[in-house]
Amino acid sequence: MAKKIALVACVSKKNPMPMPARDLYISDWFRKASAYAMRVADEWYILSAKYGLVAPDTVIEPYDETLNRMPADARRAWARRVSKELGQVLQPGDQVMLLAGIKYRENLIGPIREMGCSVEIPLQGLRIGEQLRWLKQQLGWDHA
């Protein structure tokens, strides 16, 4: 049966000690994006610049890496690794929602579609403030 899988990009703001990935990243954007992913998807994972595809409960150490500062060939190598890892998770017919910037998603969209999955990018074209506002509205947090 087809599942909805959400992939949430890592962020630079992290807790200082090893902990489950869901708790390591502490930015406002990550908190909202992961809450949205948990609400709408059957499963969700983190796209980590250092560790690749990470399940939320996996304990990882803090790091200082981002695809935004990587050269294009390093980003392609990262995407090949993550595509291989996604191959263990995705089934044809699954719907993949990418909550990630262009550098995290650009080399993943093709391989995900080649696996027979559809791709949804709800935050595409939105600046960070607009993304936060959209996520807050989706979560119903704009009334709090």
Image (cartoon, rainbow, N blue to C red):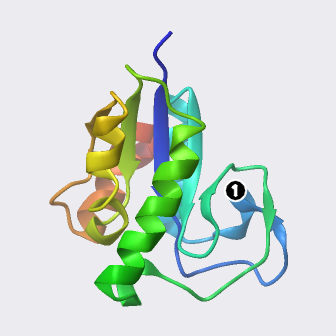
Image quarter of residue 127: bottom left
Residue 17: x %, y % from top left: 84, 80
Residue at image coords 48%, 34%: 5
The foreground one among 103 and 143 is: 103
Asked which secondary structure carries label 1, the reply is helix
Q: In this view of the protein, can residue 144 be seen by the observer?
A: no
Residue 99: x %, y % from top left: 39, 52
The crowding category of the residue bearing disc 1, from other C-alpha atoms within 10 Å (few below 14, some 14 to 19, many at least 20), is many
Q: In this view of the protein, can residue 59 be seen by the observer?
A: yes
- Residue wearing tag 1: 22
The foreground one among 22 and 61 is: 61
Residue at image coords 37%, 66%: 104
Q: Amino acid at mark 1?
A: Arg
Name the residue furthest top.
1
Residue at image coords 32%, 66%: 101
Residue 4: x %, y % from top left: 46, 27
Left-right relation of 54 to 41: right
Left-right relation of 82 to 110: right
The foreground one among 23 and 21 is: 21
80 in relation to 13, above or below: above
Residue 140: x %, y % from top left: 43, 38
